[in-house]
Amino acid sequence: MCFHTFKGIIDELPHLEKVTLQGLGEPLLAPDLLRMINYAAARGIRMGFNTNGMFLTPDRSERLVRAGLDWLHVSLDGATKETYEDIRHGSRFERVRENVIGLVQVMRRLSAERPRIMLVFVAMRRNVHELPALVRLASEWGIGALWVQNLSHSFGDTDPSGSYREIREYAQGEALWGQADDAKLERIFAEAVALGEELGVELRLPRLKEPVRVPRKEGQPGCHWPFESAYLTHDGKVQPCCMVMGSDRSVLGDVNRQRFGEIWQGREYEEFRSGLLGDAEPPEVCRGCSLYRGLF
């Protein structure tokens, strides 16, 4: 997203509180990222993003800290070089390790309390066995929090032979939900929790099974996202949330053609929200969402 588009959206929202500066790409590759952070920080808006850590050099780290970034989450889907690099093709485990430790050192040198650093681990069948080791790694790197999450979406609403076929099949093969050996997963989670308590690493774990569905009252939303926040793609398309996972899915408007406020209050948004109220079936794109299903 260019700075001009970003500034236009920010200026239109005088009560904006928080901006997450990420999409499906790497935020540190965005040419105007620091300019965006500085501009919004001057308004007192809290900002942060997820990064793969590959471009988090000491110089960039210092500029992010001085710009007032509120949080920074580093995606780390393995505790070993082999697992991590097999999942994140093109990344280098050792470089990420050096960059994260470098960020911690920059913050200590500047006596900075922000950004809050957290490791983010997408738990899958191929890597979940490394979760306890990742807790130890967080402690060794000086990181006090580890967020563990399930895959974001099942893509069950998509055509099995369409353009989302590969990611749909990937989710079916790797997702922890529906796995037969829940006892093994629970043992891994329990070990990770015990280590976190011992080492002082705050740990957030996802559910392995969907919670029992409780009928909702009329007017009670099944998800708060579309009522409180919005997701904008790099080219200005407006979607109900980041969990949609695809710029061609559930597009509710385009800020290049309409003001954001008009889209937010428009018919398509209202129709989408109404599908989340009460005990009715949600919009189709929400049915495979881990957040909606209580699994994220």
Image (cartoon, helix red, strand yellow):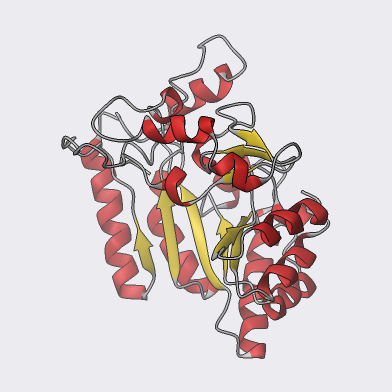
Relative side of 292 to 182, left or right: right
Residue drawn at 56 percent across, 34 percent down = 245
* Residue drawn at (30%, 24%) of the image: 281
Q: Is residue 35 left or right of residue 290?
A: right
Q: How many marks?
A: 0
Image x and y of residue 117, in percent? 54, 69
Residue for point 69% across, 76% down: 42
Residue 153 seen anywhere in this rendered image of the structure? no
- Quadrant of the rendering where the C terminus is positioned: top left
Q: Residue 149, position in %: x, y? A: 41, 48
Front residue of 256/187: it is: 256
Task: Please determine whether, in this image, residue 26 is positioned above or below residue 159.
Answer: below
Q: Is residue 186 visible?
A: yes
Q: Quadrant of residue 183?
A: top left
Q: Is residue 295 left or right of residue 48?
A: left
Could you tell me residue 209's position as x and y percent? 25, 37
> At x 49% / y 20%, what residue is drawn?
169
Closest to the observer, 84 or 275: 275
Image height of 222 relative to 160, above or below:
below
- The residue most toward the top is 161
Estimate the x, y position of residue 287 in percent, counting from the top left: 37, 27
Using the image as rendered, state which of residue 59 and residue 135 is in the foreground: 59
